[in-house]
Amino acid sequence: MKPFLFLLLTSAFILPAASAAVIYSGLQNVPIPLSLPQGQDGVFLNVWTNATANSQPGSFNTAPWMNPFLGGTAFANGNLLCPVIDAPSNPMAPDTIVNLAPGAYIYSGLNFCDGENVSSGHTAGSVTPNKFTLGLPGFLGFKFKPAVSGSAYYGWAQVVFSNTGPGSIIDWAYDDTGDFMFAGSVLPVPEPSRALLVMIGLVGVLTRRRR
């Protein structure tokens, strides 16, 4: 057997398997209060630890917190969680988060807000491109770091925003390798299997021998 062919076949058993995993919250339905009782500021969610709070935590800018309030018609984030936004047209204006289609690709090439931000123009009474429709589920994409010096991860949260009652953060997920995500998916991004790579290599070897 040719040395390079032997190496190709044995590599299927030598190369380590991929270990990508999606961390999924499960159905949570965290309520987003419509009113702001004294001392409360909507709901705060740390997507890394799944912790929630009704007043701003001391780690708001040193951990990945999101903060929807007023039923979700307003949305704030700290420095370490950056939602996908419309391309900013005015650097002095707040960045507006966008509603992603199910299965949308969440990766580094999208527009993410830069640091702490408050969005208030992201809902619409009827279906509008990139807007969240009041009372209907939508997906926001985000990237975050678990700590100031941590690596970046990509994820999504399924939400319902409302101006007539409480909204809800239904569930959320992220890929723990820093790989891209598909909005709404709880499966890791598929990677080529070792067997498939070996088959491709064998086809190449056979083609070369025929020539």
Image (cartoon, grey):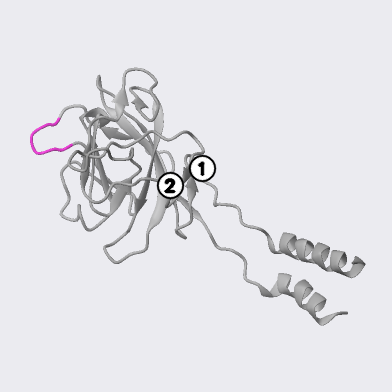
Q: Which amino acid does label 2 sit on?
A: Ala
Label of residue 173 in the image = 2
Position in image of residue 125 (x %, y %): 32, 18
Label of residue 104 in the image = none
Q: Nearer the viewer, residue 89 or 115?
A: 89
Majority secondary structure of the magenta segment?
loop
Q: Which of 31 and 134 is in front in this view?
A: 134
Position in image of residue 119 (x %, y %): 24, 36
Label of residue 185 in the image = 1
Quadrant occupied by the N terminus: bottom right
Position in image of residue 63 (x %, y %): 26, 56
Q: What residue type is labelled 1?
A: Ser
Name the residue: 78% across, 72% down: 9
Name the residue: 28% across, 40% down: 88
Quadrant in the picture for residue 16? bottom right
Q: Give the range drawn in magenta.
A: 36-41
